[in-house]
Image (tube, rainbow, N blue to C red):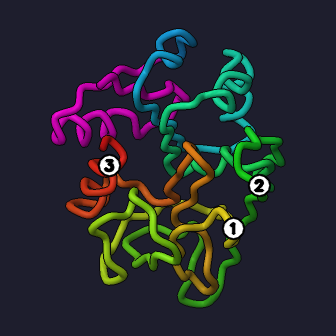
């Protein structure tokens, strides 16, 4: 199996590579279109703003390549958000492979933004990405923007109101949280993705 991490300039690439290595999967970080096309699994991590991430992808032509990919692709955090059509962050037009828009989280007493730390997620429909994951499991979030629930939502998290924690449309899936920083639960999700 060839596992490719799209080099989107994010700071979480090293920890993602380490998490994959613990699962026995060697990965390669690249922007090379041919390498990405040939990969059996593709990961799209992201940290920072949607506007900047999309500018980087446009600069390398990856904004045109990614929507055409047929193999399983997992977007992580900002990488999930830019799979959608638009983001208020910038604002930015995104990849548009999943219908919907990303909005800013609203700060409330006891719920500061950014949302940082461990939170539970609840599966709302079955999906192989979440095999073996229960609603009492916690995952690790760091974000200020989120996707409202939609037909693409397979798991939600509540932070004042529900938002999409995991989304899927065909071969494209994404996690708002960081599986590479979510301990045993995150490792299980990455393992499911590799399967």
Q: Where in the figure is residue 143, as x and y percent of width and height?
A: 56, 60
Q: Secondary structure at mark 3?
A: helix
Q: Say above or below: 71 vs 37.
A: below
Residues in magenta? 1-30
Q: Where in the figure is residue 107, as x and y percent of width and height?
A: 66, 79
The answer to whether the residue labelled 2 contacts the one labelled 1, judged by CB atoms less than 8 Å apart, is yes
Q: Secondary structure at mark 1?
A: loop
Q: Say above or below: 20 vs 129.
A: above
Classify residue 121 as left or right of residue 65.
left
Q: Say above or below: 3 vs 49.
A: above
**Quadrant housing the N terminus:** top left
Q: Where in the figure is residue 97, as x and y percent of width and height?
A: 71, 43
Q: CA distance from mark 1 to mark 3?
A: 23 Å
Circle nearer the N terminus (3, 2): 2
Q: Is residue 11 magenta?
A: yes
Based on the displayed image, in which of its 4 quarters is residue 2 positioned? top left
Taking the spot 27% from the left edge, 48% from the top edge, the residue there is 191
Circle nearer the N terminus (2, 1): 2
**Quadrant housing the C terminus:** top left
Q: Is residue 3 magenta?
A: yes
Label 3: how many residues lie within 10 Å, few (<14), some (14-19) or many (20+)?
many
Classify residue 100 as left or right of residue 72.
right
Residue under pointer 3: 190
Taking the spot 23% from the left edge, 60% from the top edge, the residue there is 183
Taking the spot 57% from the left edge, 31% from the top edge, the residue there is 70
Q: Say above or below: 50 vs 59.
A: below
Label 2: how many residues lie within 10 Å, few (<14), some (14-19) or many (20+)?
some
Residue under pointer 2: 99
Residue under pointer 1: 151
């Amino acid at each position: 199996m060839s596992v490719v991490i799209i080099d989107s300039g994010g700071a979480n690439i090293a920890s993602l590579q380490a998490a994959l290595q613990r699962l026995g999967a060697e990965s390669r970080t690249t922007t090379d279109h041919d390498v990405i096309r040939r990969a059996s699994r593709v990961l799209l991590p992201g940290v920072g703003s949607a506007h900047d991430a999309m500018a980087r992808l446009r600069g390398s032509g990856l904004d045109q390549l990614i929507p055409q990919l047929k193999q399983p692709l997992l977007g992580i955090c900002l990488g999930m958000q830019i799979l959608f059509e638009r983001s208020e962050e910038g604002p930015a037009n995104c990849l548009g492979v999943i219908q919907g828009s990303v909005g800013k989280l609203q700060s409330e007493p006891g719920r500061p933004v950014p949302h940082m730390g461990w939170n539970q997620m609840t599966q709302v429909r079955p999906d192989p990405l979440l095999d073996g994951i229960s609603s009492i499991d916690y995952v690790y979030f760091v974000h200020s923007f989120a996707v409202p629930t939609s037909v693409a939502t397979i798991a939600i998290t509540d932070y004042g109101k529900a938002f999409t924690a995991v989304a899927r449309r065909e071969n494209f899936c994404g996690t708002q949280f960081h599986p590479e920083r979510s301990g045993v639960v995150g490792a299980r999700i990455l393992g499911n993705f590799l399967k």
